[in-house]
Amino acid sequence: MDLIGERVRLRRTRPEDADVEAPIFALPDVARFTGRHLLLPQSAARLREGNTDQSGRLVWTVTAREDGGVLGDTTLFRFNHLDRHCWFAITLGPPERLGKGLGTETTTLVTRFAFRQLGMEKVCLAVFEGNERAIAAYRKAGYEIEATLRRHHLLEGQLVTEYWMAAFRDHPLYR
């Protein structure tokens, strides 16, 4: 199922998207904050393998409505239907497309889908300290920090804080 916003369209990921997404995931900030640097140097092949095995995940390729350009991907995963929560992840680039609200719009579309179509009560995500652009986008999409895990993730030789954020079904954006 495609999700369509004002400026973005989320469509089912296809194996050929990996060739377009690999350079995005190789961007320094993207690789740093997502751990995708672990996929390099054969990132396109590994992305292709990962995106075709979608068991237990819902994966969309994020495209710009204005020109159809691929911006990255987004995923819902770790579904807990008993307790009605799941996890969310997003990767966007290239840099010239950032800072225009596309991440916030994508996050809102996917979160709304989780609440309305999947019956979730809560959508969770993890983000590293220093990724202020992402944290700001998540806050605009109704997410709040729920947990602070200090010195939790090794990033470029340093243990950094990881924040767990969540949005809830009764947030005004999602009613």
Image (cartoon, helix red, strand yellow):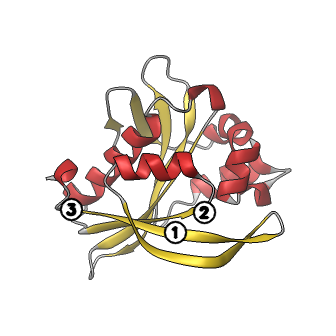
Residue at coordinates 46% horizontally, 41% vertically from top-left?
Answer: 103
Q: Is residue 113 visible?
A: yes
Q: At 57% from the left edge and 27% from the top edge, which residue is drawn? A: 97
Q: Position of residue 11 (x, y in %)?
A: 43, 39
Judge from the rendering whether residue 169 lies leftward or rightward of residue 124; answer left or right: left
Give the x, y percent position of residue 3. Answer: 33, 39
SS class, disc 3: loop
Q: Residues within 10 Å of mark 2 (few under 14, many from 20)?
A: many
Label whose residue precedes the other's in the sequence (3 or 2)? 2
Marks 1/2 in contact by CB < 8 Å: the verdict is yes
| Other residues around mark 3 within 10 Å, as few (<14) / some (14–19) / many (≥20) | some
Q: Which residue is mark 3?
A: 169
Direction from residue 169 to residue 107 in the image, left or right: right
Coordinates of residue 23 in the picture (x, y in percent): 74, 37
* Residue bearing mark 2: 128
Q: Residue furthest bottom?
A: 82
Q: Give SS at disc 1.
A: strand
Q: Which residue is mark 1?
A: 163
Residue 115 location, quadrant:
bottom left
